[in-house]
Image: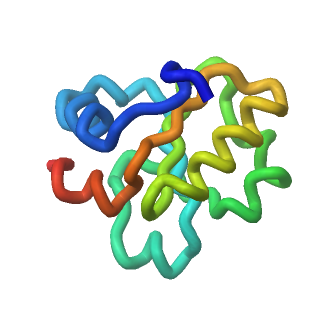
Amino acid sequence: MTDKHAITADEFAAKYNAGELDDACIIDVREPYEWEAGHLDKAHHIPMNTVPSRMNELDKTKTMYIICAHGVRSWHVTQYLLGNGFDNVINVEGGMADIEHHVR
C-alpha cells in the first residue's frame, strides 16, 4: 500500500475535527456490536463481511476513509476496494482505538 492509501489516526482526527472530511465518505467496517458501543457521527456502517455485496452503495467519486477497531480489518477492506476499481480509498491506521481519543 502506498502512503496515499493510508492516514494516521492523528491526521484523520485533525481533518475530521476541522470539517475537512464532510465531503468524504467514512466507512466503519466493524461488527454491529462494536458500532453500537460507539462510532463517529459522520460514519456509515458497512461491516467487513458485507462490503462485497454492498459495493453498489459506495460512491467512487468520493474519497473513502475506512476505519475499524485497530486498522487491520480496514486495511483488508482498503486492499479489496483498491483491487475492485476504487481509487480514492484510505485506510485509517490505528482505527477507533486511536481515533476516539482525538475526535470531538
Which image quadrant for residue 59?
top right
57 above or below 60?
Answer: below
Q: Quadrant of the N terminus?
A: top right
92 above or below 5?
Answer: below
* Residue 72 location (% of width, % of height): 55, 56
79 vs 55, nearest the viewer? 79
* Residue 6 location (% of width, % of height): 48, 31
67 above or below 22?
Answer: below
Residue at image position (36%, 29%) is 22
75 vs 48, nearest the viewer? 75
98 relative to 17 in the view: left or right: right
- Labels in figure, total: 0
35 vs 83, nearest the viewer? 83
Which image quadrant for residue 97?
bottom left
Residue at image position (34%, 55%) is 40
62 above or below 30?
Answer: above
Which image quadrant for residue 69?
bottom left
Residue at image position (40%, 32%) is 7
Residue at image position (44%, 49%) is 43
* Residue 21 location (% of width, % of height): 36, 29
52 relative to 45 in the view: left or right: right
* Residue 14 location (% of width, % of height): 20, 33
